Amino acid sequence: MAHSQGVGKVLLTGTVSDSHTWNLVFLDLFLRERGHEVVNLGPCVPADLLATRCRLDRPGLVVISSVNGHGYSDGLRAVTRLRAEPGCAAVPVVIGGKLGLDGRDDAGRADRLRQAGCAAVFDDGDLTAFDHFLTALSTGESTLAGRSA
């Protein structure tokens, strides 16, 4: 079931306010099963630390996951910080999980995350769409995927 390793190293992280780990363990395994090298930064990662690790690790993809409902606001700060970091502006960044507290999809929220620099937004953990995104990224196809949040 391994996919092409065209993505390179994947930097996996939780958001600054999210102390959950089960989502990160699951995504770590999911990515490794598909042949990707994963650097799992864990939960509660500040945007500055994420930017530093992105610069040092030179990943082919950054995956931000949140389950506490603050994924939109925390993720927006993180991707904005990544885009300001020398050497990280072109690295694809995706975010997924529970992005809001209101329990509803919000296309405007997803659009703002994309405008800030997310290549894709996977609200409520759309794993099938994420898997398609990984395949497209690995094969060089268009990477603007992901269900609107």
Image: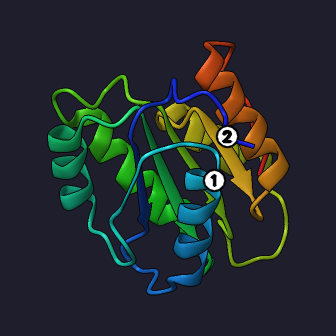
Number of numbered tags placed on the structure image = 2
Q: Nearer the viewer, residue 19 or 112?
A: 19
The type of residue carrying mark 1 is Glu
Q: Is residue 25 visible?
A: yes
For marks 2 and 1 on the same chain, the one whose residue lies earlier in the sequence: 2
Instruction: Indicate whether 11 appears above or below 43.
Output: above
Q: Nearer the viewer, residue 13 or 84?
A: 13
Position of residue 51 measured from the top left corner of the image (x, y, whole percent): 23, 48
Q: Secondary structure at mark 2?
A: loop
Instruction: Indicate whether 7 appears above or below 81.
Output: above
Instruction: Indicate whether 11 appears above or below 119.
Output: below
Residue with the mark numbered 2: 2
Answer whether labels 2 and 1 touch (C-beta < 8 Å). yes
Q: Is residue 147 visible?
A: no
> In which image quadrant can residue 84 be found?
top left
Position of residue 107 measured from the top left corner of the image (x, y, whole percent): 78, 46
- Is 147 displayed left or right of 69 in the figure? right
Spatial CA span between label 2 and label 1: 6 Å
The type of residue carrying mark 2 is Ala
Toward the bottom, the furthest residue is 19
Residue with the mark numbered 1: 33
Residue displayed at 64% across by 16% down: 139
Residue displayed at 50% across by 83% down: 21
Instruction: Indicate whether 29 appears above or below 108.
Output: below
Residue displayed at 53% across by 37% down: 118
Give neighbour class at mark 2: few <14, some 14-19, many 20+ (Cα, 10 Å). few
